[in-house]
Image (cartoon, helix red, strand yellow):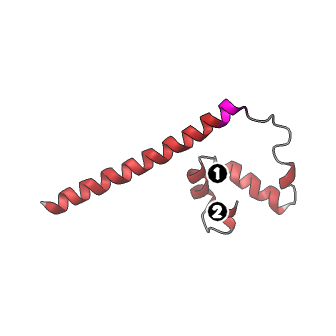
Amino acid sequence: MRLITEGGLSVHEAGRKLLLAPSTIAYWIKAQKTGKLQEVGKAQRPLTEVEMENYRLKRELAEVKMERDILKKAAAYFAKESL
């Protein structure tokens, strides 16, 4: 939520950065505005260690793929410039 309120990102950008659905973030913002943010997620069971590790690895993989794509584009750009 701080990415949106303090960081100036849109709901869509924050969702992409955090690998969350924009609708989830919008729901959290709505809950915060109505004062019910503390109640969000209380009915869900806690994640197991394996689930948390899986989520962390998926986030890391997505970040590494994004970095790889940026490096590919930069390499192609500089290769074109050197010709």
Residues under labels 2 and 1: Cα distance?
13 Å
Q: Is residue 49 left or right of residue 80?
A: right
Task: Identify the magenta region.
Answer: 48-52
Confirm or deny contact between disc 2 and disc 1 (CB under 8 A). no
Q: Residue 17 placed where, x, y %?
A: 56, 53
Q: Is residue 63 magenta?
A: no
The residue at 82%/48% (across/down) is 40
**Residue at the disc numbered 2:** 3
Q: Residue 71 placed where, x, y %?
A: 34, 53
Q: Give the quarter of the figure containing the C terminus.
A: bottom left
Q: Which mark is residue 22?
A: 1
SS category of the residue bearing label 2: helix
Q: Which mark is residue 11?
A: none
Q: Is residue 70 left or right of residue 22?
A: left
Where is residue 9, by image quadrant?
Answer: bottom right
User: Which sits in the foreground, 62 or 29?
Assistant: 62
The residue at 78%/36% (across/down) is 46
Q: Give the quarter of the figure containing the N terminus.
A: bottom right
